Image (spheres, rainbow, N blue to C red):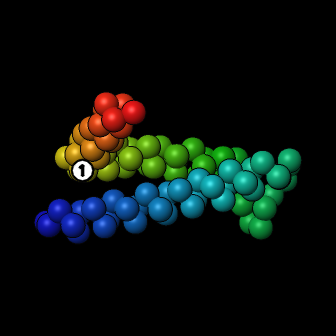
């Protein structure tokens, strides 16, 4: 499988997990008791926890796949800071 396809799949999973986690977190924050639509608070809590775990796992995978890009960005960031310190 091509790397770009894997990156697209992982990005999509991350977006879906983030939306699920954000929406269930907001519902749980404002819902003090009872049900929301047809979902119980316990079910929403489980979905929130599971989506957070999925998101955390795929963030780690995302960093592993893109480690070369991040390493290059860090080098550029550090090089620019050193260059600015030498000039200033």
The outermost residue toward the left is: 1
Query: Vertical placement of 60 versus 44: above or below?
Result: above
In the rendered image, residue 21, in percent from the top left (x then y), is placed at: 59, 53
> Which sits in the foreground, 77 or 35?
77
In the rendered image, residue 18, in percent from the top left (x then y), is placed at: 53, 56
- Dot 1 corresponds to which residue? 69
Q: Which residue is drawn at 23% across and 68% down?
A: 5
In the rendered structure, the answer to whether residue 15 lies left or right of residue 73 reads: right
In the rendered image, residue 29, in percent from the top left (x then y), is placed at: 78, 48
Query: Vertical placement of 35 versus 50: above or below?
Result: below
Q: Which residue is drawn at 32% across and 65% down?
A: 9
> Which sits in the foreground, 62 or 70?
70
In the rendered structure, the answer to whether residue 51 lies left or right of residue 41 reads: left
Quadrant showing the N terminus: bottom left
Q: Residue at x 78, y 61 (%)?
A: 36
Q: Which residue is drawn at 75% across and 50% down?
A: 28
Q: What element carries label 1?
A: helix
In the rendered image, residue 11, in percent from the top left (x then y), is placed at: 37, 62
> Which sits in the foreground, 38 or 71?
71
């Amino acid at each position: 499988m091509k790397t770009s396809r894997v990156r697209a799949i992982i990005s999509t999973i991350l977006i879906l997990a983030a939306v699920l986690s954000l929406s269930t977190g907001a519902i749980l924050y404002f819902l003090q008791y009872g049900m929301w639509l047809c979902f119980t608070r316990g079910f929403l809590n489980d979905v929130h926890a599971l989506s957070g775990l999925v998101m955390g796992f795929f963030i780690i995978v995302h960093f592993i796949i893109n480690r070369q890009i991040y390493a290059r960005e860090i080098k550029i960031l550090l090089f620019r800071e050193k260059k600015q310190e030498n000039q200033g």
